[in-house]
Image (cartoon, grey):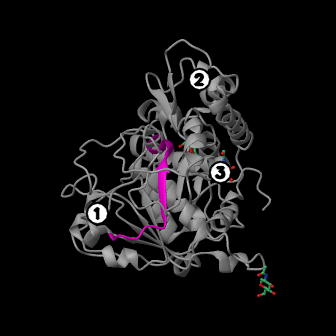
Amino acid sequence: MKRSFRPIFSVVVLTVAAATLCFRIMVFGGSGAGEIQDSVYRNNVRAEQPAPVFNDTLLRFAAVDLAEDSVRQNVEQLVDGNFRGLTSGRRSSFLRSGRHRIDIRANSGTAVPAQLRSPEFHKFWLNFRRYLQTWWRNHRFQPDVMSDLLNVVKILKPSVNDSVLNSELKYKTCAVVGNSGILLKTNLGDAIDNHEFVIRLNNARTRGFERNVGSKTSLSFVNSNILHACARKETCYCHPYGEKVPIMMYMCQMIHFLDYVVCNSTHKVPLMITDPRFDILCARIVKYYSVSRFVKETGKALEAWAGSHDGSSFHYSSGMQAVMLALGICEKVSIFGFGKSDLAKHHYHTNQKAELHLHDYQAEYDLYRDLVERPEAIPFVSDKFKFPPVVIHR
Ligand SMILES: *[C@@H]1O[C@H](CO)[C@@H](O)[C@H](O)[C@H]1NC(C)=O
Ligand SMILES: *[C@@H]1O[C@H](CO)[C@@H](O)[C@H](O)[C@H]1NC(C)=O
Ligand SMILES: *[C@@H]1O[C@H](CO)[C@@H](O)[C@H](O)[C@H]1NC(C)=O
């Protein structure tokens, strides 16, 4: 495995209904209840379409990460052991390990909390710095990163023989299950469970909803706020789907590497962090779609985009990155529970009303449509990567 930053492991787990910052699924526009739209597989459409022409101005604009400076500052500060004024504001980090605990308050005005220097925590501290530094070193754009996602499969199937071809390594069929209330209008549970590999998001529970959402989970994909909430529990329990289900998360706040190292020490199945190069690719793609849509709809200049999209807080949703992951590790991808409808709840499992503004679900839906109909129109992904066929079930 040539990758220098390898997703990592650990234990964790308990049911969490975490309120989060970086987050949650939800996407777009409803269709009638009960029907399944099996969109045409992209490969069939491909030949008829002229090669897409990307607008350079848009590409350049989408490639700028407005949060870059603040992330760099955060990393440098944390590596120096300074926990003051972290961007998370008033949030605190509270970690347990056996009978020991660390309670770091962002605004406490202390530098490295004393407990962190204690022998019990010293190894966590060293690991924390090491992982953070590695992550940051790899935090750069790399168009080929989609092909590297196969390394995730190698971690999930440790018994696989090295002589197996990459193409044989992939899962035959994958379902990415979003948390939209539209799932309650259909009984797709069995259809979901019939996939070889099922990815669920942000610990949305399945119990009581099996008919609608199924019950099989192969990978739990979350943002790091979820793990952060789990880390407050004695054993980092973070598994509504069972302890044997591996977890993958993207880091929304650098301080969450602390939660990671503490929880990892008790995790029995892989606890992985997304490759930062993969995060950057996802961020650029979603920003591209968001900006294109913004310019088309408002007729305003590109520069006005940040003001109406939370600028440096703008982020892709967990669902978007889970779909991108599936594209890299599966031969066929089915998307369920993405999309909203005036007739449906926001989430199937909560009564949350408000949508978060730091995501642009409409833009993400434009991306999914391109995945189905003309994946060659998706910017930033290396030509070497072959997108698998995608079907959206609604
Ligand atoms: C996480 O756990 C795995 C498996 O126990 C171990 O190999 C890895 O080094 C751990 N990572 C950290 C950061 O402690
Ligand atoms: C690219 O997009 C920008 C912003 O929408 C627009 O001003 C410019 O005319 C476009 N360039 C081309 C060649 O279409
Ligand atoms: C892997 O598979 C090849 C071909 O099937 C076989 O020759 C080889 O012994 C296997 N290696 C291991 C470690 O199982």
Disc 2 versus disc 3: nearer the observer: 2
Q: Amino acid at mark 2?
A: Gln
Q: For the residue with label 2, is its CB less than 8 Å from the closest atom of ligand 1?
A: no
N-term-proximal mark, 1 vs 2: 2
N-term-proximal mark, 2 vs 3: 2
Q: Position of residue 312 (x, y in %)?
A: 52, 32
So how many labels did they put on this image? 3
Q: Residues within 10 Å of mark 3 (few under 14, many from 20)?
A: many
Q: Residue at x 60, y 47 (%)?
A: 265
Q: Residue at x 56, y 61 (%)?
A: 325
Q: Which residue is mark 2?
A: 115
Task: Using the rendered image of the protein, determine whether residue 301 is visible from the camera's viewpoint.
Answer: no
Magenta span: 214-227
Q: Residue 7 in magenta?
A: no
Disc 1 versus disc 3: nearer the observer: 1
Q: Which residue is mark 1?
A: 207
